[in-house]
């Protein structure tokens, strides 16, 4: 069953290839949605796909790429969204 989650990530998550690494990981897991830098220095991710793959992605997001330092991650399930690919905004 497909579901959608919105994720908010804080810490050293901009300027460390977080978005590109996130996109690569999401594609590998068969997820769609987007990753976007926020004006306050945080990152927002919309994940759409199978719950088991979203769970795997949430584990990855809690660490991020090697250069990142994630200090906080919040996520919540939202109404099902329809995206055909995973984009960097």
Image (spheres, grey):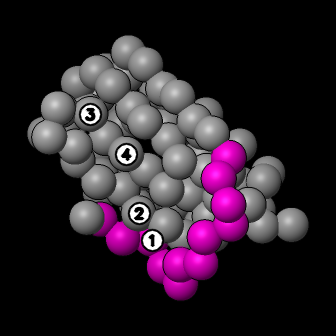
Read off the residue under disc 4: 44
Bounds of the magenta segment: 77-88
| Helix, strand or loop for disc 3 | loop
Mark 4 and mark 3 in contact? Answer it, CB < 8 Å: yes
N-terminal label among 2 and 3: 2
Disc on res. 42: 3
From the image, tell me which residue sits under label 2.
Answer: 34
Classify residue 32 by image quadrant: bottom right
Q: Residue furthest top?
A: 71
Quarter of the N terminus within the rendering = bottom right
Q: Is residue 1 left or right of residue 38?
A: right
* Residue neighbourhood size for the residue with mark 2, other residues' Cα within 10 Å, grouped as few (<14), some (14–19), many (≥20): many
Q: Along the line of sight, which residue is nearer the eye, 69 or 77?
A: 77
6, 19: nearer the viewer: 6
Q: Are marks 4 and 1 in contact (CB under 8 Å)?
A: no
Residue 71 x %, y %: 38, 15
SS at badge 4? strand
User: What residue did someone put label 1 on?
Assistant: 86
- Numbered tag placed on residue 53 in the rendering: none
- The image position of residue 30, as x and y in percent, is 63, 69
Vertical order, 81 against 78 (above or below): below
Using the numbered discs, state the Cα–Cα distance from disc 4 to disc 1 in whole angstroms: 13 Å
For the residues carrying marks 4 and 1, which lies nearer the camera in this image? 4
Residue 85 inside the magenta-drawn segment: yes
Residue drawn at the location 43% of the way across and 19% of the way down? 72
Crowding at mark 4 (Cα within 10 Å: few <14, some 14-19, many 20+): many
């Amino acid at each position: 069953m497909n579901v959608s989650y919105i994720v908010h990530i804080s810490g050293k998550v901009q300027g460390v290839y977080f978005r590109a690494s996130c996109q690569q990981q999401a594609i590998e897991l068969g997820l769609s949605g987007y990753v976007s830098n926020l004006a306050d220095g945080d990152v927002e991710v919309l994940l759409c796909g199978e719950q088991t793959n979203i769970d795997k992605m949430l584990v990855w997001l809690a660490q991020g790429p090697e250069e990142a330092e994630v200090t906080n991650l919040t996520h919540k399930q939202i109404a099902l969204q329809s995206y055909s690919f995973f984009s960097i905004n």
